[in-house]
Image: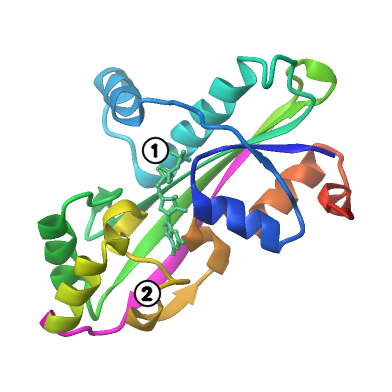
Amino acid sequence: MRLYLASTSPARLATLRAAGVEPLAVPPHVDEDSLVSAVEAEHGPLDAPRMVGLLARAKAEAVAGKPHDGAPIDGLILGGDSAFLFDGTIYGKPHLPEAARERWRRQRGRSGQLWSGHWLIDHRGGRPGRAVGANAVAVVSFADPDDAEIDAYVASGEPLEVAGAFTIDSLGGPFIRSVDGDPSTVVGLSLSTLRDLVRELGIDWPALWNRG
Ligand SMILES: Nc1nc2c(ncn2[C@@H]2O[C@H](COP(=O)(O)OP(=O)(O)OP(=O)(O)O)[C@@H](O)[C@H]2O)c(=O)[nH]1
């Protein structure tokens, strides 16, 4: 069973590979900011689960809409998105060092919710079939890095391009005190949620394992 990952996230790819699934990664090319702005202009502000759910679905549908390597996609297509909810504000990637530094100085010693959205399209036989989606949340509690540690972490560049300006599986690990929920949710793709979605489509999870 082929899984197409509608994502450029190296962490999502690594998470699937570690779980025995070798996906085909296909960049979704979705303008996330424009899509969220358009939806919010019509329906009002999106909360974190609806935002990540909307973007996960848009990425999966963007990949479903076109052939891959000149042939219709024959398999499952997974879209994902992650955002960090802290003190009532939804954060994506900080992109800028000063933004990452400011966030860490506020979030250290406290907790927030890392939300990840998932959308799975059954595209077997080269045509879109059923699609199922679910969002997952993990509560992340931070340790208390001092200013020098925050400056060093920001200088590493790692926090700039990850949701919430932190990772749990790389340099950011020592700055995370605990995670309450599926840890893979934080990395960007809840494996337990994905298994639920695969089974909801009537497919056994081991069918996705690549046994070489
Ligand atoms: N390694 C790692 N990556 C994380 C962690 N938390 C968030 N991320 C990454 O932060 C990124 C969140 O941005 P998204 O917009 O969801 O995804 P993206 O990286 O832009 O990739 P697309 O799916 O192509 O949009 C994802 O790549 C997540 O994998 C973490 O704890 N560890």
The circle drawn on residue 171 is 2
Q: Amino acid at mark 2?
A: Leu
Q: Is residue 181 left or right of residue 155?
A: right
CA neighbours of label 2 inside 10 A, class few (<14), some (14 to 19), many (20+)? few
Identify the residue at horizontal 51%, vertical 51% (top origin): 10
Task: Tell which of 211 and 119 is nearer to you.
Answer: 211
Query: Picture coordinates of residue 15 (x, y %)?
Result: 61, 59
Say what secondary structure mark 1 lies in: helix
Span of residues in magenta: 133-147
Q: Is residue 30 left or right of residue 155?
A: right
Residue 173 included in the magenta stretch of the image? no
Q: Which residue is mark 1?
A: 51
Residue 140 included in the magenta stretch of the image? yes
Identify the residue at horizontal 23%, vertical 54% (top origin): 88
Q: How far apart in space, not on screen, are marks 2 and 1 (Cα)?
A: 27 Å
Quarter of the image that includes the N terminus:
top right
Residue 16 appears anywhere in the view:
yes
The circle drawn on residue 141 is none
Query: Picture coordinates of residue 167 (x, y %)?
Result: 39, 66
Q: Amino acid at mark 1?
A: Met
Identify the residue at horizontal 24%, vertical 81% (top origin): 109
Task: Tell which of 62 and 27 is nearer to you.
Answer: 27
Say what secondary structure mark 2 lies in: loop
Query: Picture coordinates of residue 29 (x, y %)?
Result: 45, 26
Quarter of the image where one finds residue 133: top right
Relative height, residue 91 to residue 60 (above, below): below
Identify the residue at horizontal 59%, vertical 44% (top origin): 134
CA neighbours of label 1 inside 10 A, class few (<14), some (14 to 19), many (20+)? many
Relative height, residue 50 to residue 12 (above, below): above
Q: Is residue 86 left or right of residue 196?
A: left
